[in-house]
Image (cartoon, helix red, strand yellow):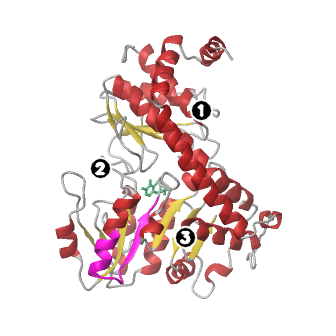
Amino acid sequence: MQDEQMTRMYEKMGISEKVYRFGRQMEEKLKERFAAIDRTAEYNQMKVIRAMQENRVSEGCFHYTSGYGYDDLGRETLEKVYASVFHTESALVRPQIACGTHALCVALAANLRPGDELLSPAGKPYDTLEEVIGIRPSRGSLAEYGVTYRQVDLLEDGTFDYENIRKAINERTKLVTIQRSKGYQTRPSFSVAQIGELIAFVKKIRPDLICMVDNCYGEFVELTEPSDVGADMVVGSLIKNPGGGLAPIGGYIAGREELIENCAYRLTSPGLGREVGATLGVMQSFYQGLFLAPTVVASALKGAILAANIYESCGFQVVPDGKESRHDIIQAVELGTPEGVIAFCQGIQAAAPVDSYVTPEPWAMPGYDSDVIMAAGAFVPGSSIELSADAPIKPPYAVYFQGGLTWPHAKLGILMSLEYLVRKGLVTL
Ligand SMILES: *Cc1c(COP(=O)(O)O)cnc(C)c1O
């Protein structure tokens, strides 16, 4: 195909020739990195297929079950598949887990008892966990049940403060929570190797401490997962990486048998545990989504890296920067002005397959202290493995964006965001 033909197609989509060529130049420079991402996806694809083969996934696993859901073959097999992928003894993978926060809440509440202490050795956890833990007073928090919390902040350079972590561990410490992705903070995300070092350090002090990793946004970014380097539990959302864009709901917890049993009794009920929980026909999407997840994550990663390089070369601060290695799929771009973040988000929205004709505007949202603008034209509402962006309207006017089920769509979204900034006169190419 002639480049001319492609340029025309992009023009029809609303991308000017100048923006298209700028993007193409940038893409040329990223060939080697993209090839490395494809190799990681290839490796992880084998890991997933092998897990499905070893556990004898069959068409019968996709059947609809309702009611109590006793002996749900699809559910039981999928949990074995997840355990194989994460190299853990056991896993809980359920549509009854409403989201990532719920999965994390179940994992914590199931394995902590009154008088126990929870330790976060890597600074403040994800916003929604503040209420789960009771850092911000909240109905039903762990604090209300007599579970205390201690936190050790990262050092200035973003590394672990080992000395103070050692001091923070006491006879009541029971569980250590480590968040792999920076989420919407400015600290760096942790590599699996860094998490492994932290776990080794903690276990040397107290081998019986339970190490849990919030794995949200990190799955399949690297060749290994935190459960390969000593994590006792890894936890995540199925409307992020491991659902591959197809899972319409759900969460997972994979880890040591005893801990996962506790989670099952907390999720359903003491005495019932993992035996109940009908799957209502979602199993096929869970399997197929997991099957697609490694290449979907690769698309999202390529999009994040393209955006980092494009916006960096336009003079904006980007986190991670254009060259840094990646440990999750989130990209932050500091656009510096409200007009900038609004144009960026409107561009992402305009490139969506769903709701492309709506114009996102900043709005007051519960739980935020400023207006927020969100762009998402997703098949699954709120899914952030699909191309999506959001930004609080406050300094430094940074937009966080992530996802992209296919690489061409991720690329279109980024080019469209640039197009909008160029049209507004906020960027000159
Ligand atoms: C998304 C996310 C969560 C919470 O997930 P929800 O599905 O939004 O409840 C927790 N931790 C991290 C790091 C996340 O990225």
Q: Secondary structure at mark 1?
A: helix
Marks 2 and 3 in Cβ contact (< 8 Å) = no
Q: Amino acid at mark 3?
A: His
Q: Amino acid at mark 2?
A: Arg
Work out how far the residue at label 1 is from the one at label 3, CA to CA, in angstroms: 32 Å
Position of 154 relative to 111 (above/below): above
- Residue under pointer 1: 409
- Residue under pointer 2: 187
Where residue 341 sits: x, y (%)?
39, 29
Where residue 48 sits: x, y (%)?
64, 59
323 left or right, relative to 301: left
Q: In the image, which residues are magenta?
A: 199-215
Q: Is mark 2 within 8 Å of ligand 1?
A: no
Disc 1 crowd, CA 10 A, few/some/many (<14, 14-19, 20+): many
Work out how far the residue at label 2 is from the one at label 3, CA to CA, in angstroms: 28 Å
Front one among 41 and 72: 41
Q: Residue at x 34, y 60 (%)?
A: 194
Based on the picture, tell me whether residue 210 belongs to the magenta stretch: yes
